[in-house]
Amino acid sequence: MCGIAGFCLKKTPESTTAILKNMADRIVYRGPDDEGYFSARTKNGSLSIGLAHRRLSIIDLGGGHQPMHNAKNTTHIVFNGEIYNYKILRRELETRGYRFSSSSDTETIIAAYDEWGKDCVTKLHGMFSFAIWDDFKEELFLARDRFGKKPLYYWSENGELIFGSEIKSLLTLPMVERRIDKNAIWDYLLYRYVPWPKTLFQGIRKLPPASYAIWRNGNLKINRYYTPPDKYPSDIRETVPDPVDGFMTVLDHAVESRMVADVPFGAFLSGGIDSSAVVGLMSRHSSEPIKTFSVGFTETQYSELAYAKVIADQFNTDHHELTISQNHLMDELPKLIRFRDAPVSEPSDIPIYLLSLEARKKVKMVLTGEGSDEFLGGYPKHKYDRYADYYNLLPQIVRKPIKGLIGQLPYRFWRHKTAINCLNLGDWSERMPSWFGSFTPQDRERLLAFKANGEVRSDSPPYDVLQENSYLRKILYFDQTSWLHDNLLERGDRMTMAASLEARMPFMDHQLAEYISSLPDECRINKNRSKWLLREGMKKLLPVEIIDRKKVGFRVPVSDWFRGPMKDYLCDHLLGSDSMSAGFFKRDALERYLNEHIQHKQNHEKLLWTILNLEIWQREYGLSE
């Protein structure tokens, strides 16, 4: 796991190596073990090419230095990630005449590129973003894994290109201006994150997941090479004899393949079924106790440490616990925004970061349960959205009083309020982001003091799903092509890498995703029981109290903190005279949302958290509207 950066520039204001080192130094925590740089010029001398790398050594500790070159020194790579099938690929490439001088998966990628060109990405099984400069073709090849586990940002103007694992590397160059993209603000306040390809910085873009880009002669062309199968209706021609057994076989392989490392490793353990399943399966493949790490809160009603301890005891893990309070939130939030180069859309970023720091004292890599909900149907919305058609068959004269009555319920019924608000949105493209968003489209209209061009493109993910598809597959496709990589995976990457810790996610295995998608919807949600495949598969491995627990996740008690110890902090940032985001909002509407929350009339926790983080982000980067 590493950090990469680079450029194709017409002019460099200083030495190429100095520029590259400056870019790499901004993300040193992504790779504290090693650094490397490559520079060249095109044959006509018109362009300067640079590649930079920071390395976190996990496999082949002595080898694997980057940038790495092929035997002829004509193709050069910087790579971030892990390729789990690299040994299989290596054997295939050796039959084709390739010879290898290291045990690194990076060397396998560059040989795969030399053999198959742009199609090499379809051969790779793992998580990755990489850049390859091809001297012969005089082109730069950029690629990102199927579900966007590893990040890649770029800036491309006037025939030049700059790229990196994190935005902060791009901002070191003077031509990359720090300007707010107001269209992205408009999106952020609906989704709680900025959907690709935009970022909050004008001109800086994300390379989409499952895509590669070719930059040649000053032109950048992006192509998508993979589509999650849930985009399409299920095509089931015959009954699978034992779908649970098949699922467990593929999941077990996904776990085992991610345990390959030349450094100590462990697992994050929340006490929920996802991380418990990962720890249970890891224990099958290890002769030593698995190191497990759990985080909880001083507010015991939000803490899951007791459930994590049940699993730790059952599998005799080497268990470590961390307890945090609201003081950690206020102390760490600005720092985490700098790590993310964006607002922290989930309060759970903070415990994940602090847990990563704690884990890094013992291990260099962890397995996590991320992705299970987005492929197996684990959120309440996956059950509710299936009834959207039935609800909208009700006449308006019935739906309107239902919405009004639900709206008057106390704040503790926020899940019910969210469900009714979303089901009232007949437009699928509005309903999808609203399930997990902080604002409804109506809230955004009421609160924002500006309008932006927030049109939905129906020809690209997540809105290119086929309308004849089932509601469950449509909402899962949205999660897999938007919510997952633009929010959860971005969070996971930044918070673990900020602690120089690699995270691997067995549930994100694309072969596992394809197997699940090949089954009937009832294998995911069966008689209103979510993640049916996983719950059935874990009956022989986990206790019932874990299998049948309601989903909690990394719940952070922000709602209570905003009414108590963080109330003044919140009000000062949003309403104070030095607020940098004030111009985006109508003050009277913002005051109303604040008062309703503080006075326990409504729970506006997500909305207020979203605005607070936008304000802190602007302060950290000195960006006014």
Image (cartoon, grey):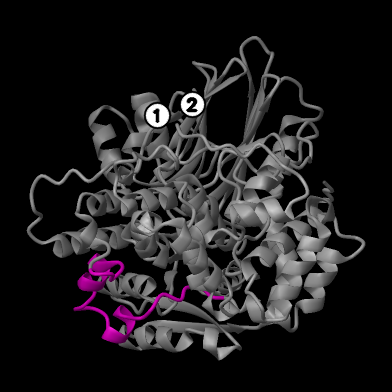
Three-letter amino acid code at the position of disc 1: Tyr
**Residue 354 vertical placement versus 253 (above, below):** below
Residue 179: x percent and y percent?
A: 78, 40
Disc 2 from disc 1: Cα separation: 9 Å
**Residue 371 vertical placement versus 478 (above, below):** below
Residue 360 forms part of the magenta stretch: no
Residue 607: x percent and y percent?
A: 65, 64
Residue 413: x percent and y percent?
A: 52, 77
Mark 2 residue element: strand
Q: Residue 75 has which mark?
A: 2
Q: Residue at x 49, y 53 (%)?
A: 425
Q: Residue at x 58, y 80 (%)?
A: 410
Main secondary structure type of the part rendered in magenta: loop
Q: Which residue is mark 1?
A: 113
Residue 552 forms part of the magenta stretch: yes
Residue 235: x percent and y percent?
A: 18, 43
- Crowd around label 1: few <14 · some 14–19 · many ≥20 (10 Å): many
Three-letter amino acid code at the position of disc 2: Thr
Residue 516, image quadrant: bottom left
- Tell me, yes or no, if residue 327 can be seen here: no
Residue 241, image quadrant: bottom left
Tell me if label 2 and label 1 are in contact, CB under 8 Å: yes
Mark 1 residue element: helix
396 vs 250, left or right, is right
- Which span of residues is magenta-colored? 527-555
